[in-house]
Image (cartoon, helix red, strand yellow):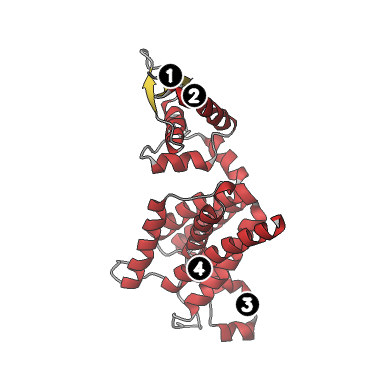
Amino acid sequence: MSQPLIAFRQQGIALLLANYLKSQQIDCVVTPSEAKDEFFVQLSREEDALKARELTEQFLRDPNNPKYQQAAWQFGDKVKLAPSGGVNTKHIFKNALAAPLTSLIFIICALVYGLSLVGLFSPIAEHLLMQPLSVLADNHQWWRLLGPAFIHFSVLHIVFNLLWWSMLGAKIERTFGSSLLFLVFAVSAVTSNIAQAFFTDPVQGNFLLFGGLSGVVYAVLGFVWWLGWLKPNWGLSLPNSIVGFMLVWLVLGYADILWVNMANAAHTAGLITGCLMAGALALIANKRKG
């Protein structure tokens, strides 16, 4: 016999909670009231009531926690907290403040791409593109080790990278703070750009024509993935479907069957860097406990 747990005025929020409860092995359904002005989360088993109430209280305290959206992806119902009437700018601004570094990198990449579209690509590239390490040793323009991360060459390129960065970067920043995210960003950008430099021939002016945030994206992917495996109690994890998709995308880049040129060395170096940094963080935590 089903047992009512809680009612919401927005169907999306009810589904969000229901999907999370399902991920915790609590069977439930969402049913609308007769007037369809409320949506009830109902439990299928009475013995789940105590645990379900505890999880519901956690949900009500922090409904924007990424773990609830992750459960929605995993169980097939993609729901949002935004009102159906339009974009909730207050909610977007609140999320941006909760992850300021993630938002800053997003804005810089979008701004650089926007300036490139209005004819300023050449001066931007001249100051940000990577150069061979031998050239950097002479001119000491070491900011170029980071610079390519902010340059994108197409709409698909920047949209793909910024979507993943927004999701994964914010996960890390909300859990560990801006300082750790900056460390992951800086280390992975440098290592992925250096790795790609060895596989790219210089063009005019000794510039290496590659760019994008994808090396960093693979780093934050590896970081969240491995921490979810090594320290599941820390609350960071990714569905296997997402990890599998990104790994297949990485392999397809090496197969050279895609319609775009992939910075395979940067992607691989970024992924390895993120995994190693997650492993190092887990190891440090274990030593402190000991």
Mark 2: secondary structure? helix
Q: Could you say which disc has been placed on residue 141 in the image?
A: 3
Q: CA distance from mark 4 to mark 3?
A: 26 Å
Residue with the mark numbered 2: 49
* Residue labelled with disc 4: 272
Question: Which callout, 4 or 2, points at the residue further toward the start of the chain?
Answer: 2
Asked if marks 4 and 2 touch (Cβ < 8 Å), the reply is no
Residue 263: x and y, percent?
A: 42, 71
Q: Are marks 4 and 3 in contact (CB under 8 Å)?
A: no
User: Disc 1 to disc 2, how far (Cα)?
Assistant: 8 Å
Instruction: Identify the secondary structure beneath mark 3.
Output: loop
- Circle 1 SS class: strand
Q: CA distance from mark 3 to mark 1?
A: 65 Å
Tell me where residue 207 appears, x and y as whole percent.
50, 79
Q: Residues within 10 Å of mark 1 (few under 14, many from 20)?
A: some
Q: Identity of the amino acid at label 1?
A: Gln
Q: Quadrant of residue 105?
A: bottom right
Q: Earlier in the sequence, mark 1 or mark 2?
A: 1
